Image (spheres, rainbow, N blue to C red):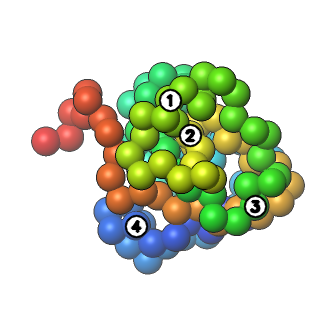
């Protein structure tokens, strides 16, 4: 099992969280499976930027983003060198520390 430490985020997890994850699962699906409601407007199909995260530790254990993910990341709010779409970042056998950006760009959000 790998561990993902999610740094505190004002809305999604104000106190931060630590979750255990089976390798082979995406960061997004792991978070959703633990009740952490990260946005994922495209249903994890790599067609938006709403699940953008910043990998603060452990990014070397992830496969590099492919061209499609890179194209979408270019549109994400608060892009950093270790930014990833959490629906595409597959957990391996190393622990990760993840930060959720303060904002997300979601043109189709139904939460009013």
Q: How far apart are marks 1 and 3 (CA)?
A: 22 Å
Name the one closer to the observer, 86 or 69. 69
Location of residue 54 in the rendering, given as x and y in whole percent from the top left corner? 56, 55
Residue 3 image point, x, y percent? 73, 64
Q: Mark 1 points at which residue?
A: 72
The residue singled out by tag 2 in the image is: 85
The label number, if any, that marks residue 9 in the structure image? 4
Q: Nearer the viewer, mark 4 or mark 2?
A: 2
At x 38%, y 72%, the residue is 14
* Residue 25 marker: none
Mark 3 vs 4: CB contact within 8 A? no
SS at circle 4? loop
Question: Which quadrant does the C terminus fall into?
Answer: top left
Residue at disc 1, secondary structure: helix
For the residues bearing labels 1 and 2, Cβ distance under 8 angstroms = yes
Query: In the rendered view, does 61 fall on the left or right side of 88?
Result: right
Other-residue count near label 3 (Cα within 10 Å), few / some / many at <14 / 14–19 / ≥20: some
Q: In this view, does 43 lie above or below 38?
A: above
The span from disc 1 to disc 2 (Cα, nearest Å) is 8 Å
Q: Earlier in the sequence, mark 3 or mark 2?
A: 3
Tell whether label 2 touches label 4 (CB within 8 Å): no
């Amino acid at each position: 099992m790998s561990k993902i430490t999610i740094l505190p985020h004002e809305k999604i997890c104000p106190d931060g969280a630590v979750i255990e994850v089976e390798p082979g699962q995406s960061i997004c699906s792991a978070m959703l499976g633990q009740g952490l409601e990260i946005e994922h407007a495209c249903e994890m199909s790599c067609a938006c930027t709403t699940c953008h995260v910043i990998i603060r530790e452990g990014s070397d254990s992830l496969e590099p983003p492919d061209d499609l993910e890179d194209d979408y990341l270019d549109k994400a709010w608060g892009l950093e060198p270790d930014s990833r779409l959490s629906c595409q970042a597959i957990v391996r056998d190393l622990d990760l520390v993840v930060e959720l950006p303060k904002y997300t760009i979601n043109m189709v959000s139904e939460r009013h």
